[in-house]
Image (tube, rainbow, N blue to C red):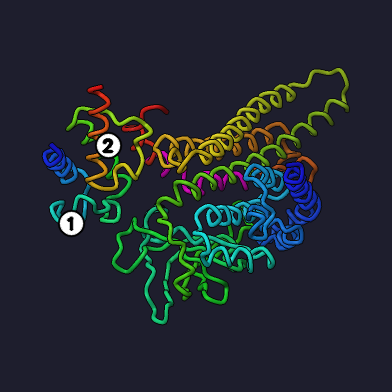
């Protein structure tokens, strides 16, 4: 027990160290140059953080989702792009770990490739022509002879696609399958090609390097994760995405708040005893931050409870879908509101990009949150679910 | 009993499931989602079933697996009726 707790604490300390040193030192350049945060990701590799969630019997760190989430938050406090890359990688790892079949190729992959080599996995879930619905695919797993399968997928964005060692791609389960009948296929870098179809010069989260690609791949059939993707999505990929993203957005919001607080303290020290109207704005910001913290925390705890129930059945209910959709909407909106509120507190000192109170990057990074699985689309889904779900 | 329930389920599916094939071509145990029923259409199917059978599916039943086939839907409706009778 104490060894397990030590593992969790050791990883968290290591990631905090990377966040506060390497990730923080490169955050501005990563943002300005819209370049991949390779220093931070390599430092996380050195700490074996990329395999932290893999069970120890498969060679990983065996840490809990709570600790992974806390790591996302800590990275978010210093570099949103590093945090997002780390979070998206962990989403793929959690998905594989929770849905692999015993003695399958995926066990071997985790034990012999991901853990020793600290491979980085990117996901290819969105697709041109599906209207942003991750639950439908056009591209299909296509038999290619000799036990191989191939695919070609038009992906509007692939986060850090060119920097990933492996890709997890959602596809129709076969050439004749309906759009909603999906599986996920893992391909190594050398088994796939990425033909860029666009650029990545964006407002925020610039370091995630997420342009569109035509992705083509060929791999042995064993690399198909056979669990139906509808189930994988409901039980793992979607809620875990919302939970880990929310943690890193909270991290960004916390740092924006800390900068606003430092600004107010500096102002108070300059003119001791004088009224400081901006301090009240800070107080209002704190209330909003504490609400965000509570929502992020309770969603994580709900997920852990639902996951431990037999068959994880509650995760497949509409009530659970609504619950984690609400987390995503709340966290994406409130983190951006808090960054904006921090700018109001800091004024021109926050607006400038080179002061200790700069919050421009925080504001721009959190503005991407509403677009990652667009909030409008989630509201559309929720509106349908509300017609039938009872307790919400 | 079951056959008339299944006939009524088929009627609801014909009206709301927006399947790419005729409902009569779908076996009782075929997977409706694999046959092309979308999540969005499944909500309308659930509403249609609640209306047709004058019942309410509790939250724990509002899962994909409960609505994945005519047989599964039929079992859920039977379970709810049994619960109401008891």
Check the image and name the residue furthest to the bottom. A146
Residue A121: percent from left, percent from top: 59, 62
Q: Is residue A73 left or right of residue A24?
A: left
Determine whether A155 is above or below A219 in the image. Answer: above
Tally of numbered tags: 2
Q: Is residue A131 left or right of residue A36?
A: left
Residue at image location 40% in from the left, 27% down from the top: A391
- Part of the protein shown in magenta: A365-380
Determine whether B42 is above or below A266 in the image. Answer: below
Whether residue B63 is visible, yes or no, is yes
Location of residue A107 by image quarter: bottom right
Per the image, the residue denoted by label 1 is B21
Q: Secondary structure at mark 2?
A: helix
Residue at image location 24% in from the left, 34% down from the top: B77
Along the line of sight, the residue nearer the viewer: A330 or A267: A330
Q: In what quadrant of the picture does the N terminus of chain A appear? A: top right
Q: Is residue A4 left or right of residue A235?
A: right
**Mark sitting earlier along the chain (1/2):** 1
Per the image, the residue denoted by label 2 is B76
Chain holding disc 1: B
Along the line of sight, the residue nearer the viewer: A210 or B81: B81
Chain holding disc 2: B
Crowding near the residue tagged with mark 1, few <14, some 14–19, many ≥20 C-alpha atoms within 10 Å: few
Along the line of sight, the residue nearer the viewer: A77 or A4: A4
Principal secondary structure, stretch drawn in magenta: helix
Residue B63: percent from left, percent from top: 36, 40
Residue at image location 29% in from the left, 40% down from the top: B43
What is the C-alpha distance between the residues marked 1 and 2? 24 Å
Residue A153: percent from left, percent from top: 42, 68
């Amino acid at each position: 027990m104490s060894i397990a707790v030590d593992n969790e604490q050791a990883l968290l300390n290591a990631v905090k160290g990377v966040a506060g040193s390497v990730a923080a030192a490169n955050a501005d350049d990563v943002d300005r140059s819209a370049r991949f945060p390779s220093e931070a990701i390599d430092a996380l590799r050195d700490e074996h953080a990329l395999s932290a969630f893999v069970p120890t019997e498969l060679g990983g760190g065996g840490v809990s989702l709570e600790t992974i989430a806390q790591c996302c938050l800590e990275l978010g406090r210093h570099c949103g792009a590093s945090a997002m890359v780390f979070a998206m990688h962990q989403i793929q790892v959690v998905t594989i770990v929770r849905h692999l079949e015993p003695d399958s190729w995926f066990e071997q992959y985790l034990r012999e490739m991901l853990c020793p080599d600290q491979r980085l996995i990117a996901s290819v879930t969105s697709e041109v022509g599906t209207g942003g619905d991750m639950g439908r695919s056009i591209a299909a797993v296509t038999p290619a002879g000799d036990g191989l399968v191939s695919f070609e997928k038009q992906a509007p964005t692939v986060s850090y696609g060119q920097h990933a060692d492996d890709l997890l791609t959602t596809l129709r389960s076969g050439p004749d399958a309906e759009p909603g009948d999906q599986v996920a296929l893992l391909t190594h870098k050398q088994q796939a090609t990425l033909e860029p179809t666009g650029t990545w010069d964006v407002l925020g989260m610039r370091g995630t390097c997420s342009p569109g690609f035509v992705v083509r791949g060929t791999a042995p059939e064993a690399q198909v994760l056979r669990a139906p993707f509808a189930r994988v999505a409901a039980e793992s990929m979607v809620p875990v995405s919302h939970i880990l993203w929310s943690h890193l957005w909270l991290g960004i919001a916390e740092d924006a708040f800390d900068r606003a607080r430092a600004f107010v303290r500096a102002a108070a020290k300059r003119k001791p005893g004088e009224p400081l109207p901006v301090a009240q704005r800070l107080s209002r910001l704190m209330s909003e931050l504490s609400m965000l913290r509570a929502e992020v925390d309770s969603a994580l705890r709900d997920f852990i409870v639902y996951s431990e129930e037999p068959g994880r059945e509650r995760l497949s209910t509409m009530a659970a879908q609504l619950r984690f959709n609400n987390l995503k909407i709340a966290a994406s909106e409130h983190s951006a509101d808090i960054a904006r509120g921090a700018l109001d507190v800091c004024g021109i000192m926050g607006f400038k990009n080179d002061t200790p109170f700069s919050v421009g990057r925080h504001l721009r990074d959190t503005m991407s949150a509403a677009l990652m699985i667009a909030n409008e689309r989630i509201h559309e889904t929720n509106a349908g679910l509300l017609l039938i779900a009872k307790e919400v | 009993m079951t056959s008339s329930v299944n006939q009524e389920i088929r009627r609801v599916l014909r009206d709301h499931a927006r399947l790419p094939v005729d409902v009569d071509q779908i076996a009782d145990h075929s997977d409706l989602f694999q046959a092309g029923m979308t999540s969005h259409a499944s909500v309308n199917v659930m509403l249609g079933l609640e209306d047709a059978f004058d019942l309410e599916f509790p939250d724990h039943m509002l899962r994909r697996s409960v609505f994945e086939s005519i047989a599964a839907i039929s079992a859920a409706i039977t379970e709810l009726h049994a619960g109401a009778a008891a």
